Image (tube, grey):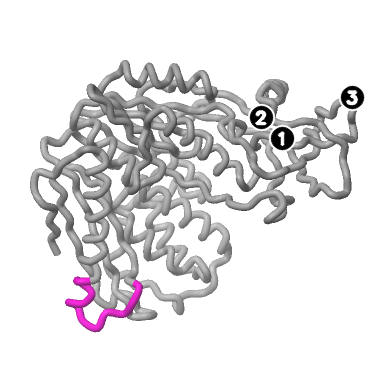
Amino acid sequence: MNTEFDALLKNQTWTLVPSTQAHNLVGCKWVFRVKRRADGSIERYKARLVAKGFHQQPGIDYTETFSPVVKPITVRIVLSLALSKNWFVRQLDVQNAFLHGCLSEEVYMTQPPGFNHPQFPNHVCKLHKALYGLKQAPRAWFSRLTTWLLSFGFIASWSDSSLLIYHHTNYTMHFLIYVDDIIITSSQASAIDSLLHQLGSEFAVKDLGGLNYFLGIEVVPCTPGVLLSQKKYILDILTRTKMSEAKPVSSPMAFSTHLSVLDGDPCDDPTLYRSTVGALQYLSITRPDIAFSVNKLSQFMHNPTTLHWQSVKRLLRYLKQTIHFGLHIQPSSTTDLQGFTDADWAGDRDDRRSIGGYSIFLGSNLVSWSCKKQATVARSSTEAEYKALANAAAEIKWFTTLLKELGVSLQSPPYNMV
Protein backbone atom coordinates (compact mmCIF):
# COMPACT_ATOMS: atom_id res chain seq x y z
CA MET A 1 0.00 0.00 0.00
CA ASN A 2 2.82 2.40 0.83
CA THR A 3 4.50 1.66 -2.50
CA GLU A 4 1.29 2.29 -4.42
CA PHE A 5 0.58 5.49 -2.51
CA ASP A 6 4.10 6.78 -3.11
CA ALA A 7 3.71 6.05 -6.83
CA LEU A 8 0.48 8.06 -6.87
CA LEU A 9 2.15 11.03 -5.20
CA LYS A 10 5.21 10.83 -7.46
CA ASN A 11 2.94 10.80 -10.50
CA GLN A 12 1.11 13.93 -9.23
CA THR A 13 -2.18 12.11 -9.56
CA TRP A 14 -4.11 14.63 -7.47
CA THR A 15 -4.06 17.89 -5.55
CA LEU A 16 -5.73 18.33 -2.18
CA VAL A 17 -8.42 21.04 -2.27
CA PRO A 18 -11.15 22.10 0.19
CA SER A 19 -14.41 20.21 -0.14
CA THR A 20 -17.57 22.01 -1.27
CA GLN A 21 -21.17 20.95 -1.82
CA ALA A 22 -20.84 21.76 -5.54
CA HIS A 23 -18.45 18.84 -6.12
CA ASN A 24 -19.70 15.36 -6.91
CA LEU A 25 -17.46 13.29 -4.65
CA VAL A 26 -16.23 9.89 -5.85
CA GLY A 27 -15.21 7.34 -3.23
CA CYS A 28 -12.22 5.00 -3.37
CA LYS A 29 -10.97 1.77 -1.79
CA TRP A 30 -7.92 -0.48 -1.70
CA VAL A 31 -8.02 -3.68 -3.76
CA PHE A 32 -5.57 -6.50 -3.07
CA ARG A 33 -4.61 -9.08 -5.65
CA VAL A 34 -2.21 -11.99 -6.06
CA LYS A 35 -0.42 -12.00 -9.44
CA ARG A 36 0.42 -15.50 -10.65
CA ARG A 37 2.67 -16.91 -13.35
CA ALA A 38 1.58 -19.27 -16.14
CA ASP A 39 2.26 -22.30 -13.93
CA GLY A 40 0.08 -20.92 -11.13
CA SER A 41 2.93 -19.96 -8.80
CA ILE A 42 2.78 -16.59 -7.02
CA GLU A 43 4.69 -13.81 -8.77
CA ARG A 44 3.90 -10.91 -6.42
CA TYR A 45 1.27 -9.35 -4.19
CA LYS A 46 -0.35 -6.13 -5.37
CA ALA A 47 -2.28 -3.36 -3.64
CA ARG A 48 -4.14 -0.93 -5.87
CA LEU A 49 -6.17 2.17 -5.11
CA VAL A 50 -9.42 1.97 -7.07
CA ALA A 51 -11.95 4.76 -7.51
CA LYS A 52 -15.62 3.92 -7.07
CA GLY A 53 -16.69 4.71 -10.60
CA PHE A 54 -20.35 4.01 -9.84
CA HIS A 55 -20.37 7.33 -7.94
CA GLN A 56 -19.63 9.21 -11.17
CA GLN A 57 -22.35 11.12 -13.02
CA PRO A 58 -22.46 11.33 -16.83
CA GLY A 59 -21.81 14.78 -18.22
CA ILE A 60 -20.23 15.90 -14.94
CA ASP A 61 -17.43 13.45 -14.11
CA TYR A 62 -17.10 11.81 -17.52
CA THR A 63 -18.27 11.91 -21.13
CA GLU A 64 -16.72 9.39 -23.55
CA THR A 65 -15.54 6.11 -22.05
CA PHE A 66 -14.91 3.74 -24.97
CA SER A 67 -11.37 2.45 -25.36
CA PRO A 68 -10.42 -0.07 -28.08
CA VAL A 69 -8.35 -3.20 -27.49
CA VAL A 70 -6.54 -5.28 -30.06
CA LYS A 71 -8.57 -8.05 -31.68
CA PRO A 72 -7.49 -11.65 -30.98
CA ILE A 73 -7.53 -12.21 -34.76
CA THR A 74 -5.00 -9.41 -35.22
CA VAL A 75 -2.72 -10.98 -32.59
CA ARG A 76 -2.86 -14.34 -34.36
CA ILE A 77 -2.13 -12.74 -37.76
CA VAL A 78 0.84 -10.70 -36.51
CA LEU A 79 2.22 -13.69 -34.61
CA SER A 80 1.87 -15.90 -37.68
CA LEU A 81 3.70 -13.36 -39.84
CA ALA A 82 6.43 -12.86 -37.22
CA LEU A 83 7.11 -16.61 -37.05
CA SER A 84 7.09 -16.95 -40.83
CA LYS A 85 9.55 -14.05 -41.25
CA ASN A 86 11.64 -15.01 -38.20
CA TRP A 87 11.00 -11.63 -36.58
CA PHE A 88 11.68 -10.74 -32.95
CA VAL A 89 8.71 -10.70 -30.57
CA ARG A 90 8.75 -8.92 -27.21
CA GLN A 91 6.15 -8.44 -24.51
CA LEU A 92 5.78 -5.36 -22.32
CA ASP A 93 3.82 -4.45 -19.25
CA VAL A 94 3.17 -0.86 -18.20
CA GLN A 95 3.16 -0.45 -14.44
CA ASN A 96 0.24 1.61 -13.11
CA ALA A 97 -0.84 2.20 -16.70
CA PHE A 98 -4.06 4.08 -15.95
CA LEU A 99 -2.17 6.57 -13.78
CA HIS A 100 -0.51 7.93 -16.93
CA GLY A 101 -3.80 8.98 -18.51
CA CYS A 102 -4.61 12.69 -18.26
CA LEU A 103 -8.17 13.67 -17.35
CA SER A 104 -10.03 16.33 -19.32
CA GLU A 105 -12.92 16.45 -16.83
CA GLU A 106 -12.93 17.72 -13.24
CA VAL A 107 -13.14 14.72 -10.92
CA TYR A 108 -13.03 14.95 -7.13
CA MET A 109 -12.30 11.93 -4.93
CA THR A 110 -12.10 11.26 -1.21
CA GLN A 111 -8.67 10.74 0.30
CA PRO A 112 -7.42 7.12 0.29
CA PRO A 113 -8.46 5.11 3.37
CA GLY A 114 -5.63 5.07 5.91
CA PHE A 115 -3.73 7.89 4.18
CA ASN A 116 -5.58 11.05 5.22
CA HIS A 117 -3.35 14.10 5.29
CA PRO A 118 -2.77 15.04 8.98
CA GLN A 119 -2.98 18.78 8.28
CA PHE A 120 -5.92 18.64 5.84
CA PRO A 121 -8.10 15.70 6.95
CA ASN A 122 -11.28 17.18 5.42
CA HIS A 123 -9.80 18.05 2.03
CA VAL A 124 -10.61 16.07 -1.12
CA CYS A 125 -8.45 14.97 -4.04
CA LYS A 126 -8.83 16.86 -7.30
CA LEU A 127 -7.67 14.30 -9.85
CA HIS A 128 -5.28 15.29 -12.64
CA LYS A 129 -4.46 11.74 -13.77
CA ALA A 130 -6.76 8.79 -14.21
CA LEU A 131 -7.21 6.08 -11.58
CA TYR A 132 -8.33 2.47 -11.85
CA GLY A 133 -12.08 2.34 -11.49
CA LEU A 134 -12.86 5.62 -13.23
CA LYS A 135 -15.12 5.12 -16.22
CA GLN A 136 -12.88 7.15 -18.54
CA ALA A 137 -9.57 5.71 -17.26
CA PRO A 138 -9.02 3.17 -20.10
CA ARG A 139 -9.79 5.80 -22.74
CA ALA A 140 -7.45 8.37 -21.13
CA TRP A 141 -4.59 5.85 -20.98
CA PHE A 142 -5.07 4.68 -24.57
CA SER A 143 -5.20 8.28 -25.81
CA ARG A 144 -1.98 9.18 -23.96
CA LEU A 145 -0.08 6.13 -25.24
CA THR A 146 -1.22 6.38 -28.86
CA THR A 147 -0.52 10.12 -28.95
CA TRP A 148 3.08 9.43 -27.92
CA LEU A 149 3.45 6.62 -30.47
CA LEU A 150 2.05 8.75 -33.30
CA SER A 151 4.51 11.51 -32.44
CA PHE A 152 7.28 8.90 -32.55
CA GLY A 153 6.34 8.04 -36.13
CA PHE A 154 3.91 5.14 -35.85
CA ILE A 155 0.84 4.97 -38.06
CA ALA A 156 -2.50 3.74 -36.68
CA SER A 157 -4.09 0.89 -38.59
CA TRP A 158 -7.48 1.51 -40.19
CA SER A 159 -8.43 -2.13 -39.74
CA ASP A 160 -7.63 -2.33 -36.02
CA SER A 161 -7.11 0.90 -34.09
CA SER A 162 -5.10 -0.91 -31.39
CA LEU A 163 -2.44 -1.89 -33.95
CA LEU A 164 0.20 0.70 -34.77
CA ILE A 165 2.78 0.24 -37.52
CA TYR A 166 6.21 1.82 -37.93
CA HIS A 167 7.89 1.64 -41.33
CA HIS A 168 11.58 2.41 -41.68
CA THR A 169 13.99 1.97 -44.53
CA ASN A 170 15.71 -0.94 -42.79
CA TYR A 171 13.01 -2.42 -40.58
CA THR A 172 9.33 -2.52 -39.66
CA MET A 173 7.71 -2.62 -36.21
CA HIS A 174 4.22 -3.65 -35.13
CA PHE A 175 2.83 -2.40 -31.81
CA LEU A 176 -0.26 -4.18 -30.40
CA ILE A 177 -2.09 -2.73 -27.39
CA TYR A 178 -4.47 -4.50 -25.01
CA VAL A 179 -4.87 -1.96 -22.18
CA ASP A 180 -1.48 -2.22 -20.37
CA ASP A 181 -0.33 -5.47 -22.03
CA ILE A 182 1.70 -4.80 -25.16
CA ILE A 183 3.29 -6.94 -27.88
CA ILE A 184 6.01 -5.59 -30.17
CA THR A 185 7.34 -7.38 -33.25
CA SER A 186 10.16 -6.17 -35.47
CA SER A 187 12.61 -7.41 -38.04
CA GLN A 188 15.46 -5.94 -35.95
CA ALA A 189 16.00 -6.46 -32.23
CA SER A 190 17.93 -3.18 -31.96
CA ALA A 191 14.85 -1.28 -33.14
CA ILE A 192 12.80 -2.71 -30.27
CA ASP A 193 15.56 -1.85 -27.77
CA SER A 194 15.68 1.73 -29.04
CA LEU A 195 11.90 2.08 -28.78
CA LEU A 196 11.85 0.65 -25.26
CA HIS A 197 14.55 3.08 -24.16
CA GLN A 198 12.54 6.08 -25.35
CA LEU A 199 9.24 4.63 -24.16
CA GLY A 200 10.73 4.09 -20.70
CA SER A 201 11.50 7.79 -20.37
CA GLU A 202 7.78 8.55 -20.63
CA PHE A 203 6.10 5.55 -18.97
CA ALA A 204 6.98 2.97 -16.33
CA VAL A 205 7.63 0.13 -18.79
CA LYS A 206 8.58 -3.38 -17.71
CA ASP A 207 10.24 -5.53 -20.37
CA LEU A 208 8.96 -9.09 -19.98
CA GLY A 209 11.26 -10.51 -22.67
CA GLY A 210 9.92 -12.95 -25.23
CA LEU A 211 6.22 -13.62 -25.54
CA ASN A 212 5.26 -16.38 -23.08
CA TYR A 213 2.05 -15.44 -21.22
CA PHE A 214 -0.39 -12.89 -22.62
CA LEU A 215 -3.94 -12.22 -21.35
CA GLY A 216 -4.18 -15.63 -19.72
CA ILE A 217 -2.88 -17.36 -22.85
CA GLU A 218 0.33 -19.35 -22.50
CA VAL A 219 2.64 -19.22 -25.51
CA VAL A 220 4.50 -22.54 -25.47
CA PRO A 221 7.46 -22.93 -27.86
CA CYS A 222 7.29 -26.11 -29.92
CA THR A 223 8.81 -27.46 -33.11
CA PRO A 224 7.89 -25.81 -35.36
CA GLY A 225 6.33 -22.57 -34.09
CA VAL A 226 4.37 -22.04 -30.87
CA LEU A 227 1.28 -23.45 -29.18
CA LEU A 228 -1.30 -21.01 -27.78
CA SER A 229 -2.68 -22.78 -24.71
CA GLN A 230 -5.13 -21.86 -21.94
CA LYS A 231 -4.45 -24.85 -19.70
CA LYS A 232 -4.40 -22.85 -16.46
CA TYR A 233 -7.61 -21.09 -17.47
CA ILE A 234 -9.33 -24.44 -18.05
CA LEU A 235 -8.16 -25.71 -14.66
CA ASP A 236 -9.64 -22.62 -13.00
CA ILE A 237 -12.99 -23.20 -14.72
CA LEU A 238 -13.05 -26.87 -13.71
CA THR A 239 -12.20 -25.98 -10.11
CA ARG A 240 -14.83 -23.25 -9.92
CA THR A 241 -17.56 -25.56 -11.28
CA LYS A 242 -16.39 -28.54 -9.15
CA MET A 243 -15.74 -30.61 -12.27
CA SER A 244 -12.06 -31.36 -11.59
CA GLU A 245 -12.79 -35.01 -10.83
CA ALA A 246 -15.42 -35.53 -13.53
CA LYS A 247 -15.12 -38.37 -16.01
CA PRO A 248 -13.64 -37.07 -19.30
CA VAL A 249 -15.32 -37.53 -22.69
CA SER A 250 -13.95 -37.34 -26.23
CA SER A 251 -16.47 -34.93 -27.84
CA PRO A 252 -17.80 -31.52 -26.76
CA MET A 253 -21.44 -32.31 -27.52
CA ALA A 254 -23.37 -35.44 -28.34
CA PHE A 255 -24.42 -35.75 -31.99
CA SER A 256 -28.05 -36.36 -31.01
CA THR A 257 -28.29 -33.24 -28.76
CA HIS A 258 -30.87 -30.67 -29.91
CA LEU A 259 -31.29 -27.94 -27.32
CA SER A 260 -34.41 -25.79 -27.03
CA VAL A 261 -35.62 -23.02 -24.71
CA LEU A 262 -38.68 -25.16 -23.90
CA ASP A 263 -36.86 -28.30 -22.72
CA GLY A 264 -36.02 -29.06 -19.10
CA ASP A 265 -36.75 -27.48 -15.74
CA PRO A 266 -35.36 -24.10 -14.66
CA CYS A 267 -31.70 -24.23 -13.70
CA ASP A 268 -30.96 -24.23 -9.96
CA ASP A 269 -28.15 -21.67 -10.30
CA PRO A 270 -28.57 -19.47 -13.40
CA THR A 271 -25.67 -17.23 -12.29
CA LEU A 272 -23.26 -20.17 -12.35
CA TYR A 273 -24.49 -21.12 -15.82
CA ARG A 274 -23.97 -17.61 -17.17
CA SER A 275 -20.54 -17.14 -15.61
CA THR A 276 -19.37 -20.56 -16.87
CA VAL A 277 -20.58 -20.00 -20.43
CA GLY A 278 -19.03 -16.53 -20.38
CA ALA A 279 -15.71 -18.06 -19.36
CA LEU A 280 -16.03 -20.62 -22.15
CA GLN A 281 -16.52 -17.80 -24.66
CA TYR A 282 -13.09 -16.43 -23.74
CA LEU A 283 -11.62 -19.92 -23.92
CA SER A 284 -12.73 -20.20 -27.56
CA ILE A 285 -9.96 -17.69 -28.44
CA THR A 286 -7.57 -20.64 -28.70
CA ARG A 287 -10.06 -23.51 -29.00
CA PRO A 288 -11.96 -23.47 -32.32
CA ASP A 289 -13.12 -27.02 -31.57
CA ILE A 290 -15.60 -25.74 -28.96
CA ALA A 291 -16.89 -22.77 -30.99
CA PHE A 292 -20.13 -24.49 -32.07
CA SER A 293 -20.96 -25.78 -28.58
CA VAL A 294 -20.25 -22.45 -26.91
CA ASN A 295 -22.37 -20.60 -29.46
CA LYS A 296 -25.26 -22.99 -28.85
CA LEU A 297 -25.05 -22.72 -25.06
CA SER A 298 -24.81 -18.93 -25.21
CA GLN A 299 -28.32 -18.74 -26.68
CA PHE A 300 -29.90 -19.77 -23.38
CA MET A 301 -28.25 -17.30 -21.01
CA HIS A 302 -31.56 -15.53 -20.35
CA ASN A 303 -33.35 -18.66 -19.11
CA PRO A 304 -31.10 -21.72 -18.69
CA THR A 305 -32.60 -25.09 -17.81
CA THR A 306 -31.25 -28.29 -16.31
CA LEU A 307 -30.74 -29.78 -19.78
CA HIS A 308 -28.65 -26.79 -20.80
CA TRP A 309 -26.53 -27.17 -17.69
CA GLN A 310 -26.01 -30.85 -18.50
CA SER A 311 -24.61 -29.81 -21.89
CA VAL A 312 -22.27 -27.35 -20.17
CA LYS A 313 -20.99 -30.13 -17.92
CA ARG A 314 -20.52 -32.35 -20.97
CA LEU A 315 -18.36 -29.62 -22.53
CA LEU A 316 -16.36 -29.28 -19.30
CA ARG A 317 -15.71 -33.02 -19.28
CA TYR A 318 -14.45 -32.71 -22.87
CA LEU A 319 -12.11 -29.90 -21.81
CA LYS A 320 -10.71 -32.10 -19.08
CA GLN A 321 -9.98 -34.76 -21.69
CA THR A 322 -8.33 -32.22 -24.03
CA ILE A 323 -6.76 -29.84 -21.52
CA HIS A 324 -3.44 -29.91 -23.39
CA PHE A 325 -5.05 -28.87 -26.68
CA GLY A 326 -4.32 -25.43 -28.10
CA LEU A 327 -3.87 -23.46 -31.28
CA HIS A 328 -0.69 -24.24 -33.19
CA ILE A 329 0.93 -21.30 -35.01
CA GLN A 330 3.87 -22.28 -37.18
CA PRO A 331 6.11 -20.68 -39.82
CA SER A 332 4.47 -20.73 -43.22
CA SER A 333 6.11 -20.43 -46.61
CA THR A 334 3.03 -18.85 -48.21
CA THR A 335 0.65 -16.01 -47.40
CA ASP A 336 -2.35 -17.42 -49.25
CA LEU A 337 -5.77 -16.76 -47.73
CA GLN A 338 -8.12 -19.75 -47.73
CA GLY A 339 -11.66 -19.71 -46.41
CA PHE A 340 -14.01 -22.61 -45.70
CA THR A 341 -17.71 -22.12 -44.94
CA ASP A 342 -20.68 -24.27 -44.06
CA ALA A 343 -24.25 -23.84 -42.86
CA ASP A 344 -26.81 -25.94 -41.04
CA TRP A 345 -30.11 -24.99 -42.65
CA ALA A 346 -32.91 -24.29 -40.11
CA GLY A 347 -30.71 -25.81 -37.40
CA ASP A 348 -32.36 -23.93 -34.53
CA ARG A 349 -35.49 -25.71 -33.30
CA ASP A 350 -37.02 -22.58 -31.77
CA ASP A 351 -36.88 -19.99 -34.56
CA ARG A 352 -35.73 -22.15 -37.52
CA ARG A 353 -32.78 -19.90 -38.26
CA SER A 354 -29.67 -21.47 -39.73
CA ILE A 355 -26.26 -21.85 -38.12
CA GLY A 356 -23.41 -20.49 -40.25
CA GLY A 357 -19.71 -20.92 -39.72
CA TYR A 358 -16.38 -20.34 -41.38
CA SER A 359 -12.67 -20.86 -40.84
CA ILE A 360 -9.92 -18.83 -42.51
CA PHE A 361 -6.29 -19.87 -42.94
CA LEU A 362 -3.32 -17.60 -43.53
CA GLY A 363 -0.87 -19.95 -45.17
CA SER A 364 -0.99 -23.07 -43.01
CA ASN A 365 -2.22 -21.30 -39.87
CA LEU A 366 -5.83 -21.08 -38.74
CA VAL A 367 -6.24 -17.42 -37.72
CA SER A 368 -9.98 -16.78 -37.76
CA TRP A 369 -13.15 -18.79 -37.22
CA SER A 370 -16.77 -18.17 -36.38
CA CYS A 371 -19.92 -20.12 -35.62
CA LYS A 372 -23.13 -18.22 -34.99
CA LYS A 373 -26.81 -18.16 -35.76
CA GLN A 374 -27.72 -16.21 -38.89
CA ALA A 375 -29.61 -12.95 -38.46
CA THR A 376 -32.59 -13.91 -40.66
CA VAL A 377 -34.46 -17.06 -41.64
CA ALA A 378 -33.16 -18.71 -44.82
CA ARG A 379 -35.86 -20.05 -47.13
CA SER A 380 -33.64 -22.74 -48.60
CA SER A 381 -30.39 -24.53 -47.87
CA THR A 382 -28.81 -22.64 -50.78
CA GLU A 383 -29.74 -19.30 -49.22
CA ALA A 384 -28.25 -20.41 -45.90
CA GLU A 385 -25.01 -21.38 -47.63
CA TYR A 386 -24.85 -18.05 -49.46
CA LYS A 387 -25.30 -16.15 -46.20
CA ALA A 388 -22.46 -18.10 -44.60
CA LEU A 389 -20.36 -17.44 -47.69
CA ALA A 390 -21.12 -13.70 -47.51
CA ASN A 391 -19.98 -13.54 -43.87
CA ALA A 392 -16.73 -15.29 -44.74
CA ALA A 393 -16.18 -13.02 -47.73
CA ALA A 394 -16.60 -9.94 -45.51
CA GLU A 395 -14.01 -11.33 -43.08
CA ILE A 396 -11.59 -12.09 -45.92
CA LYS A 397 -12.03 -8.55 -47.25
CA TRP A 398 -11.06 -7.20 -43.82
CA PHE A 399 -8.09 -9.59 -43.84
CA THR A 400 -6.79 -8.29 -47.16
CA THR A 401 -7.01 -4.68 -45.92
CA LEU A 402 -5.10 -5.52 -42.75
CA LEU A 403 -2.43 -7.49 -44.60
CA LYS A 404 -1.96 -4.60 -47.03
CA GLU A 405 -1.35 -2.26 -44.08
CA LEU A 406 1.15 -4.75 -42.68
CA GLY A 407 3.02 -4.70 -45.98
CA VAL A 408 2.11 -8.27 -46.93
CA SER A 409 1.24 -9.00 -50.54
CA LEU A 410 -0.88 -12.04 -51.29
CA GLN A 411 0.74 -14.51 -53.66
CA SER A 412 -2.63 -15.40 -55.13
CA PRO A 413 -6.21 -14.09 -54.81
CA PRO A 414 -8.06 -15.35 -51.73
CA TYR A 415 -10.54 -18.12 -52.33
CA ASN A 416 -13.40 -19.56 -50.37
CA MET A 417 -14.76 -23.10 -50.36
CA VAL A 418 -18.32 -24.02 -49.35
- Screen quadrant of the N terminus: top right
* SS at mark 2 in the image: strand
Q: Amino acid at mark 1?
A: Trp
Where on the picture, by quarter, is residue 3? top right
Residue range in magenta is 375-386
* SS at mark 3 in the image: loop
Measure the C-alpha gap from mark 1 to mark 3. Answer: 20 Å
Residue at horizontal 35 percent and vertical 73 percent from the top:
375
Residue count near mark 3 (Cα–Cα under 10 Å), binned few <14, some 14–19, many ≥20: few
In the picture of the structure, the residue carrying the numbered disc 1 is 30
Which of these two is toward me, 142 or 377?
A: 142
Which of these two is toward me, 258 or 65?
A: 65
Measure the C-alpha gap from mark 3 to mark 2. Answer: 22 Å
In the picture of the structure, the residue carrying the numbered disc 3 is 118
Circles 2 and 1, Cβ within 8 Å, touching? The answer is yes
User: Is-magenta flag for residue 9?
Assistant: no
Residue at horizontal 32 percent and vertical 46 percent from the top:
73
Residue at horizontal 27 percent and vertical 26 percent from the top:
168
